[in-house]
Image (cartoon, rainbow, N blue to C red):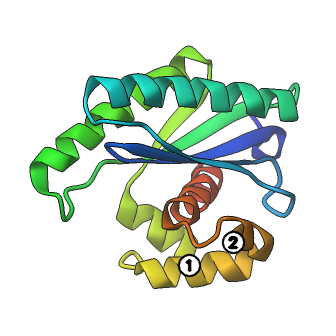
Amino acid sequence: MRRMDDCVHLGIDPASTRIALVAYHDADEPIFAENKKLGKSGAPACSAARQETLAFVEKCRERWPGLAVVAAVESPVVGRGGPRATIVQAFASGAIQGALFDAGVEVSLANVSSWKKRVIGNGRASKEDIANFVGLRWPTFFSQAEGSQDLADAICIARYGELTA
């Protein structure tokens, strides 16, 4: 059984045309993050999601050599865009999960309500609640993220993965 303090924790918030990735080894140390546009949805976005994910994992391994990398990926959810947007998001999520698997990364899925409940304390937490939490818990990261809701979600997803491993 792997000790979670011997791991790099990734949190990934995928969408149909963008991906937010956050990584840390110790939740109190500096955090490594990227927020990338994937381009047009569909096959081009899936390909870009795969490439960005593999590149991010490689950067994490360079930054934290010798540590295992584990990832939590937010599960697709039917939202404002309706079923079509969810299906496209699911395609990108599948490309991300496949890339992580191919890179030898343990992957878990993070249900939206579950990660919000476990990390924020409220399964129906609003964007404002999440931003407030991240601003208090990781003020330097929050400042550097310049208000990116995607990056705020991604760091919470990473924390959820750590807490539930």
Quarter where residue 105 is shown: top right
The residue tagged 1 is 131
Q: Residues within 10 Å of mark 1 (few under 14, many from 20)?
A: some
* Element type where label 2 sits in the image: helix
Percent x, y for residue 72?
53, 44
Percent x, y for residue 163?
63, 57
Q: Residue furthest top?
A: 102
Quarter where residue 97 is shown: top left
Q: Is residue 82 above or below residue 23?
A: below
Q: Residue at x 52, y 62 (%)?
A: 153
State which tag comes first along the sequence, 1 or 2: 1
The residue tagged 2 is 142
Q: Amino acid at mark 1?
A: Ala
| Residue nearer the viewer, 96 or 4 | 96
**29 displayed left or right of 159:** right
The alpha-carbon separation of the residues under discs 1 and 2 comes to: 8 Å
Q: Is residue 11 above or below residue 50?
A: below
Q: Is residue 60 above or below residue 86?
A: above
Q: Residue at x 36, y 31 (%)?
A: 45
